Image: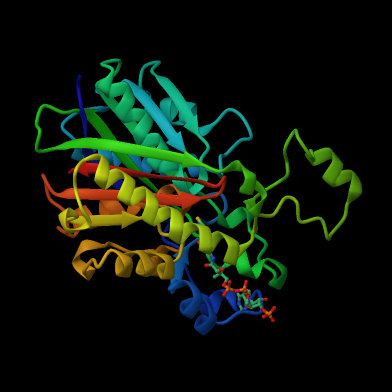
Amino acid sequence: MYTSFINGLGHYVPENRVTNDDLSQWMETSDEWIRERTGIEERRFAVKGEDTTTSMGVKAAKVAIERSTVSKDDIDFIIFATLSPDYYFPGPGVLVQRDLEIGTVGALDVRNQCSGFVYALSVADQFIRSGMYKNILVIGSELHSHGLDMTTRGRSVSVIFGDGAGAAVVSRSDSDQSQILSSHLHSEGQHAEELALIAPGMGKRWVSDILADNDPNDVSYMPYMNGQFVFKHAVVRFAEVIHEGLSHNGLSTEDIDMLIPHQANLRIAQFIQKKFKLSDDQVHNNIMKYGNTTAASIPIALTEAWELGKIKRGDLVVLAAFGSGFTWGSVIMRF
Ligand code: COA
């Protein structure tokens, strides 16, 4: 049986910074409310026409490939996680294959929202374990800002999210010191509508219906989140799935060198840190700067932690995510 490791990491965020005070010019909110509830101080919003989910993913991917031991021509598969694709179909995976001019390798799109990168990494790991592929490009990228309700009506959702992308080259490992040990994935679809964007979709509403109704109060094409319900489930599931991963490997929370939690809300990350009695050096958060970038949040934070020298080869790194679906998961690795 083969194993896989993270061979290269990269991230990209648009230059355009949007502070909490900027948001308060468009909706009734305040810097104090946003900081207190979420920890977010600013986020990046792509400028229309300059970036797309795919283009940000491609920029992050180029950095990850550059920093890896392989070249783009060695990539034998692409996995792209996002909830904000450029097109309804095809997904961004094939657009990356086109833009990077990577042969005719397969491209898979993962739709698991905030857990997207953890799911995508797990899929990459399984393909490498089976021997099918050697080098897989895994991308998480989101362009939220163009799809948010920037009026007071949407404020409980819109202040949280930001744009950005992260990428990893996942390769076959030849060292016990550096390998993904396990991944654990879960879902609970009974809560699907508690954090969702219902339209456009074939199931309920299609664009023509929305346009025909011309109803300014129709919010089915805006993201909806039952914030407190999500919060309560997130803290339980994060803790469960981290424990599940650690105990599967005979490890305990003291063994963690770095926990990278999905950057949903600083209060959730702090709750988990306290519960596990982890020091500030053992958890990396950057939601203050970028907001919640959904599928991009873990690869951005992982890249940043590595760039800052907070993680090095051989460290026990734990990734954990929770989000819409509900879906959640963890990856345990020797970095
Ligand atoms: N600015 C100012 N006031 C706001 C606001 C904003 N951006 N958003 C909501 N409010 C108001 C509400 O209207 C409400 O007012 P009311 O009491 O007069 O009715 C009040 O603030 C409290 O709203 P509530 O939704 O109960 O706030 P909260 O304490 O639950 O915080 C979240 C909201 C979204 C920050 C919080 O629930 C949360 O972080 N949930 C988890 C979200 C998450 O992690 N999502 C991603 C999952 S991957």
Location of the N terminus (image quadrant): top left
- Left or right: residue 32 versus residue 313 is right
In this view, 294 is above or below 124: below
- Left or right: residue 130 versus residue 287 is left
In this view, 258 is above or below 123: below
Where in the figure is residue 261, as x and y percent of width and height?
Answer: 35, 56
Is residue 223 visible in this depiction of the protein?
yes
In this view, 100 is above or below 112: above
Q: Residue at x 30, y 55 (%)?
A: 260
Location of the C terminus (image quadrant): top left
- Left or right: residue 280 versus residue 261 is left
Q: Residue at x 60, y 42 (%)?
A: 189
- Left or right: residue 37 versus residue 280 is right
Quadrant of residue 136 within the rendered picture: top left
Where in the figure is residue 210, as x and y percent of width and height?
Answer: 83, 46
Q: Residue at x 39, y 70 (%)?
A: 288
Q: Residue at x 40, y 55 (%)?
A: 238
Q: Quadrant of ligand 1?
A: bottom right
Please name whichever residue, 329 or 102, is drawn nearer the observer in this view of the structure.
329
Where in the figure is residue 274, as x and y percent of width and height?
Answer: 31, 70
Q: How is the image coloured?
A: rainbow
Please name whichever residue, 126 or 160, is drawn nearer the observer in this view of the structure.
126
Please name whichever residue, 238 or 176, is drawn nearer the observer in this view of the structure.
238
Where in the figure is residue 158, as x and y percent of width and height?
Answer: 60, 64
Quadrant of residue 204 within the rendered picture: top right
